[in-house]
Amino acid sequence: MARKGAVRIGISGWTYKPWRGVFYPKGLPQKRELAYAAQHFHSVEINGTFYSMQLPGSFAQWSEDTPDDFVFAIKGSRYITHMKRLKDARTPLANFFASGLLRLGQKLGPILWQFPPQMRFDAVRFETFFRLLPRTSMEAAELAQDHDERVDGRDWTRAITELPLRHAVEIRHESFCTGEFIELLRRYNIALVCADTPEWPLLMDVTADFIYCRLHGAEQLYSSGYDDDALDRWAARIDTWARGQEPVDANRVLAPLKANEAGRDVYVYFDNDAKVHAPFDAANLAARLGIGEPLQRSQENRKTRRVRQTTAEKPARM
């Protein structure tokens, strides 16, 4: 079966000081970093939306800085997932969607909802939240109009274009490794994030009409890179998903689904940014799938990276 689903390989965030002079050319203005990254990747995750509400003008600028066929994945607000823990989520959701996401228009891709490691599966709480999630840009615009005073005067509550919205969830507690949770996700067509990390469950159950992967570093969270063998394995899995099938080595809770003849879109983001592995791993994975060019560090950049690794802390994500 030929690959039919679209495959997008990218990076989780783009504003990282240690990347300057290693991935980004020396002297590149910070305001040009997104445009430079978009020359190499078809998508990035916006992580700043997790930490605080952004401004509509920021979304408009990000859209302007990227090609027409570019797509942003948006990380959902931690106020909803970590502080409210999904309780009384309607108004916070309205504020989130009113903050400017819809200014991305056709470039608005999947929305990622990441949950804290201590949060356990609660079927009622999660289903209540899933029912609130808008499934189209028009529904999101309607919900955004119910925002409160926190976004007064800085809101954007209309859809530039009509498009479906996709949602994905990243779990970090073993209590989610249950058929009840997988079936709930399938009922609402919400993707279970395939999160590659030594610290949290790695599940590959297909629960939606698309696949969402986050590669955090299989050996050391945020820090370890992916060697040739690992990238080959991920390339094979991604190609299989895009063809509408499931990898033979997939770690699942439930049995695989019937093959989807239409294929599935696959989104993959590298989050192993601490030692500047992410952009190089992403580019080299994309090259294996025929959708990008490989990248190699120069000798000068390798030396710069070694010096920075001795003192640099994990950078804040954008």
Image (cartoon, grey):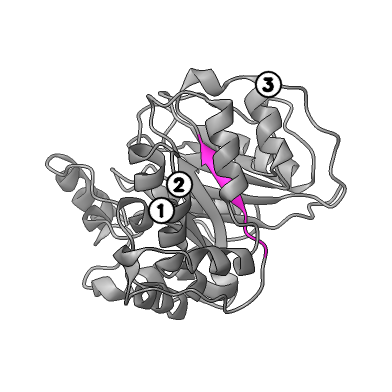
Left or right placement of residue 214 versus residue 187 in this view: left
Residue 167 or residue 273, whichever sits in front: 167
Check disc 2 and report the residue beneath it.
89
Q: Which residue position is annotated with label 3? A: 179
Q: Are marks 1 and 2 in contact (CB under 8 Å)?
A: yes
- Lower position in the chain sequence, tag 1 or tag 3: 1
Label drawn at residue 92: 1
Secondary structure at badge 2 equals loop
Identity, as a three-letter code, of the amino acid under mark 2: Ala
Q: Looking at numbered disc 1 in the image, what kind of residue is underneath it? A: Pro
**Circle 2 Cα neighbour tier, 10 Å, few/some/many (<14 / 14–19 / ≥20):** some
Query: What residue lies at 35% left-to-right and 32% top-to-bottom?
Result: 221
Secondary element under disc 1, as helix, strand or loop, is helix
Which of 143 and 252 lies nearest the eye of the viewer?
A: 143
| Relative to 160, 64 lies left or right | left
Element at badge 3? Answer: helix
Residue at x-position 43% and y-position 35%: 115
Q: CA distance from mark 2 to mark 3?
A: 25 Å
> Above or below — where is 112 with respect to 28?
above
Q: Nearer the viewer, mark 1 or mark 3?
A: 1
Residue pictured at 41% horizontal, 53% vertical: 92
Label 3: how many residues lie within 10 Å, few (<14), some (14-19) or many (20+)? Answer: some
Q: Which residues are magenta?
A: 164-170
- Residue 297's quadrant in the figure? bottom left
Residue sitting at the far left: 311
